[in-house]
Amino acid sequence: MTVAHGPRSASRGPSASAVRHRPWPLCRNCCGVALDMGSARTRAWIAGRGLVLDVPTVTFPGAGAVYPIQRGTIVDTQGTARMLSRLLGHRLPRFTRPLVVVTAPVLDGVAFRTEARTAVEVLRPRSVLTVPSARAVALGAGADLTRPLLVVDVGAHLTEVVLLSDGAVVDARRTALGTSDLETAAAEQIGEAVAAMVTAMLRQDRTSLTLDALHRGALLAGGGALRPEITYHLTGRLHAPLTAVAAPHTAAVRGAATLLHSAHTHPSTRPSTPRDRHPR
């Protein structure tokens, strides 16, 4: 089990209640892509079209299949780039440079973001933004980010428990267990691992944030939220309200799409015009 503490960020993103995703018109200056690249599945949301991809994260450089992302780590950057080119290259309007928002695991996020930026260059982006997966999940769920929130994301190969305050990561833990391990590990083990991570958060939290978030109830996302045996054991071990996100497996990419819409309207990501380049 990996344990880390995320620094409190001074920047605040838009709350899901304030920002609603609206389809964009298909135009040259509106091209944008939201990406959620997991160990098992890759999902993509294109502005104006919605969710266009939900496919296995796999490449075929030769006779066999290669999995370029493993346990939340990009192990084959070039393979990831080839996958993105194959899946998205023909879906984007020609002669455009999209704005891309990529979700990233909270822990090992720096390494993931670096490799993801390199891989995404194959799409010729005008800008690449990254967002912690837990924050994207909260936005995709329409959660109130002005209050402390505990996000439990049970993926195929990785489970993260993240404490958010004002939308920023305060604390984060993870374990290399997920739904793909259910053949060799019982769902009870995932429940025990999550309970141990939350207990550690409570013990090391000198504020009331973790306790406040628990009283409010944890938000459950990822494919694990669709497995009754996992939700059963999590509810029993946490002794706190547990709310599964609607369509939990796509919550992160939906949240990234929400941020994509906000980022698109921000001056720093807007394509420059002659007036911008030559101000009076």
Image: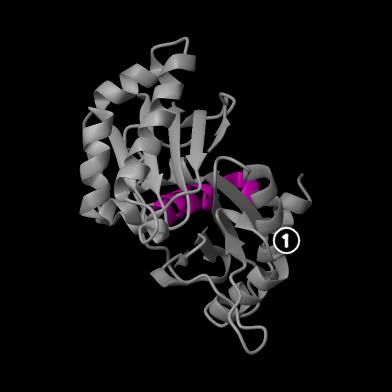
Which is the main secondary structure of the residues drawn in magenta? helix
In the orientation shown, which residue stands out farthest toward the top? 206
Q: Residue at x 62, y 67 (%)?
A: 68
Percent position of residue 153, x then y = 39, 45
Residue 15 painted magenta? no
Which quarter shows the C terminus?
top right
Residue at (53% x, 38% y) in the render: 1
Specify the farthest residue to the front: 184
Name the foreground residue: 36 vs 68.
68
Q: In the figure, 165 relative to 63: above or below? A: above
In the rendered view, tell whether residue 261 sits above or below residue 204.
Answer: below
According to the image, label 1 marks what residue?
A: 118
Tally the marks: 1
Q: Secondary structure at mark 1?
A: helix
Residue 25 image-quadrant placement:
bottom left
The answer to whether 177 appears left or right of 113 in the picture is left
Kind of residue at disc 1 = Thr
> Can residue 66 be seen from the camera position used here?
yes
Question: Who's the residue at 52% across and 79% down the image?
Answer: 91
How is the model colour-coded? one colour
Is 256 included in the stretch rendered in magenta? yes
Question: Where residue 101 appears, x then y in whole percent?
Answer: 55, 54
Q: Is residue 278 above or below residue 191?
A: below
Q: Nearer the viewer, residue 182 or 46?
A: 182
User: Which span of residues is magenta-colored?
Assistant: 252-271
Quarter of the image holding residue 19? top left
| Label 1 neighbour load within 10 Å: few <14, some 14-19, many 20+ | some
Asked if residue 272 shows in the view, the reply is no
Q: Is residue 172 above or below residue 66?
A: above
The reply, left or right, for residue 77 in relation to residue 12 is: right
What is the x, y in percent for residue 245? 27, 47
Where residue 143 sits: x, y (%)? 31, 37
